[in-house]
Image (cartoon, grey):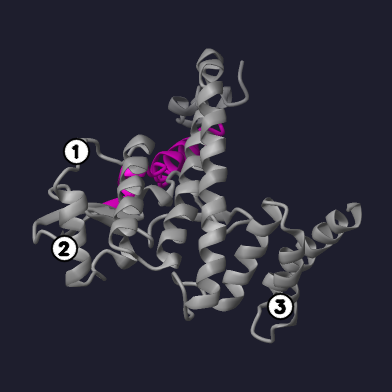
Amino acid sequence: MGILSGLKRLGLGNLEKTDIYETEKEEARQKKKEAPQAAPKPQEKDLIYEKSYECPVCGSAFSSKIMKSSKARLVGADQDLRPRYEVIDSVKYDVVMCPICGYAALGNSFTHISPGQAKLIKENICSSVQITVYHNDTYSYEEALERYQLALASAMVKRAKASEKAFICLKSGWLLRGYAESLQNSQNSQENLENLAQLEEMKKQEEEYLENAYKGFMEARQTENFPMCGMDEITMDYLLSVLAMRFQHYDVAARLLSTVLTSPSASSRVKDKAREMKDLVLQELRKR
């Protein structure tokens, strides 16, 4: 006999076999059912859009995939300022390329081209370029690398400033780093083994691009005005100090870091990072 067996005498026999906590259980089930479901994690394709352009070289209308900065979630940055976003590698979407004539440049400089430069592009790029056609929802690393190569070729041909060429080299290095990381994160161990040679080659190419970025920015720092590639003087000096240390130019790194540390306009966050770096630089200098 249950604890509710006496209810029949009271005319409530229909409740004798009821779970005394059924009401609470039903309410809990209902709340769980009505609770808002967590939004699905966005995919890379959800964080880009097609932006319309008119090519300043050939006049063709086209669109280029651009990252939605307001939607992408920034989770950090590498020491050399490479941004890291959740789900998406923003660097893949920084180059705008005309699919008709092959002219390419970083988005912030794509339309900044003189008639003389356009003529050089037509003569040296458009007349012979062979463009690979892709039909993907996103830019693969292979496609992005081709776009960066065309951007660098265009910058060289149109005799762009050292800073523009250096910035393309910097971002090309970042792109290769992201590509290598995507391969290393593969769950297939056999695939990782097969990618070892490719990863080693990517590392060499990344170093070559970053060294060219360092050389170009050092030249630009002496000959161009700030802001440069969206960076003020403090940001540029910090970036150059990171690159100088990477290539064992410790005396240059120490000098640049001192400039950052004594600048009244440098933020406390930048100065903290500069102090940490300077300690490492001084350790290396003492080894000499």
| 10 Å crowding of disc 1: few (<14), some (14-19), many (20+) | few
Q: CA distance from mark 2 to mark 3?
A: 41 Å
Where disc 2 sits, the SS reads: helix
Where disc 3 sits, the SS reads: helix
Mark 3 = which residue?
Answer: 259
What is the span of residues highlighted in magenta in the rendered image?
20-49
In this rendering, is residue 206 above or below 7?
A: below
In this rendering, is residue 68 above or below 26?
A: below
Residue 56 shown left or right of residue 283 in the figure: left
Residue 32 part of the magenta segment: yes
Q: Which mark is residue 196?
A: none
Where disc 1 sits, the SS reads: loop
Q: Earlier in the sequence, mark 1 or mark 3?
A: 1
> Label 1 sits on what residue type?
Gln
Seen from the viewer's position, the closer of residues 185 and 244 is 244
Residue 7 image position (x, y, % from top left): 53, 28
Q: Quarter of the image for the N terminus: give it.
A: top right
Residue occupying the point 21% across, 52% down: 124
Q: Which mark is residue 119?
A: 2
| 10 Å crowding of disc 3: few (<14), some (14-19), many (20+) | some
